[in-house]
Every structure is written in C-alpha cells, then in structure tokens.
C-alpha cells in the first residue's frame, strides 16, 4: 500500500502565498512522478503540477509562473509553492503519485486551500 500525507493548506488573501507538502510512504517503488491535483466545488479534479523522477515538470496553464513544484527523491516528498494566489485557486488539493509500470495513481486525502478577501 501507498500512503500520502499532505500538509500546508489554509486560508489566504488574494495575492498571498501558501506551500503544500506531501510525504509518500509504503510500497513506493518505481515512481514515475509526483504532483498535485485540485478539485473545486462542482468541478472535475484537474492537474495542477507534476514532476517526474527525471525532474521534468508539467503545469496547468492557469498556474504557470505562479506555482512551483519540487521534489526530494531521497525523502519521497513533493512540495507545491503557490504564489500570487487568486480566488479561482480555491479548491481541495490532492497529492498524487504515479507508479510504473502502469502509471497507477495513488492519492492523499486532500488539503483545503481558500483564497478570499
């Protein structure tokens, strides 16, 4: 089994910053990538940012230039630095890990991010 534990959500005013962190443990072999998805009320879950084992990153267009994803491969952690937050960034954020060979997804329980004045 794979366990993902997130931390760092909360409430912030527009223009503010938050940092999310996630630690993976358990049967985490052959990681393809780790990252973050989010789901706003009434919307589908969407990719926010992903970073592969090789360091390649992929961001949603809506967060490019504002969010930065990083990993510590040795510690199996992934972080998301979120700057210049907007109300439309409000959502539940889920840590994700994709394991080879089938790119199987594992999820954390989610952490809430609220951006409001």
Image (tube, grey):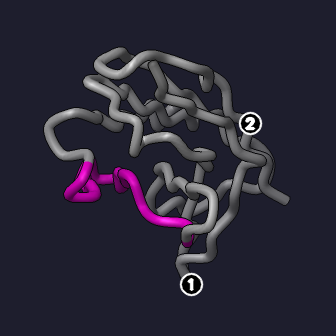
- Residue 98, above or below 21: below
Res. 16 visible in picture? yes
Q: Secondary structure at mark 1?
A: loop
Depth order, front residue of 29/72: 72
Which quadrant of the view contains residue 97?
Answer: bottom right
Compute the Cα span from label 2 to label 1.
Answer: 22 Å
Q: Could you tell me residue 104's position as x and y percent?
A: 62, 76
Q: Is residue 40 above or below residue 79?
A: below
- Tell me the number on the disc at residue 102: 1
In the rendered image, residue 47, in percent from the top left (x then y), is placed at: 42, 62
Looking at the image, the residue that sits furthest to the right is 1
Q: Residues within 10 Å of mark 2 (few under 14, many from 20)?
A: some
- Give the mark nearer the N terminus: 2 vs 1: 2
Residue 17 location, quadrant? top left
Farthest residue toward the front? 117
Quarter of the image with the N terminus is bottom right
Residue assigned mark 2:
5
Asked whether, in this view, residue 96 is left or right of residue 12, the answer is right
Numbered range of the magenta stretch: 44-62
Along the viewing direction, whichever of 99 and 39 lies nearer the viewer: 39
Of labels 2 and 1, the one closer to you: 2
Taking depth in this image into account, of 16 and 47 the one nearest to the observer is: 16
The stretch drawn in magenta includes residue 83: no
For the question of whether residue 75 can be seen, the reply is: no
**Residue at x 29%, y 19% (from the top left corner):** 15
- Expressed as whole percent of the image width and height from the top left, the position of residue 68 reads 28, 34
Return the x and y of residue 66 as percentages of the image width and height: 22, 33
Q: How many marks?
A: 2
């Amino acid at each position: 089994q794979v366990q993902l534990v997130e931390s760092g959500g909360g409430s912030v005013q527009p223009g503010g910053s938050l940092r999310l962190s996630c630690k993976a443990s358990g049967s985490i072999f052959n990681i393809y990538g780790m990252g973050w998805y989010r789901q706003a009320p009434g919307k589908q879950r969407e990719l926010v940012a992903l970073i592969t084992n090789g360091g390649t990153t992929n961001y949603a267009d809506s967060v490019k230039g504002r969010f930065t994803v990083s990993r510590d491969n040795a510690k199996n952690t992934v972080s998301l630095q979120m700057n210049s937050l907007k109300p439309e960034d409000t959502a539940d954020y889920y840590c994700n890990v994709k394991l080879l060979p089938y790119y199987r997804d594992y999820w954390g329980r989610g952490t809430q991010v609220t951006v409001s004045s």
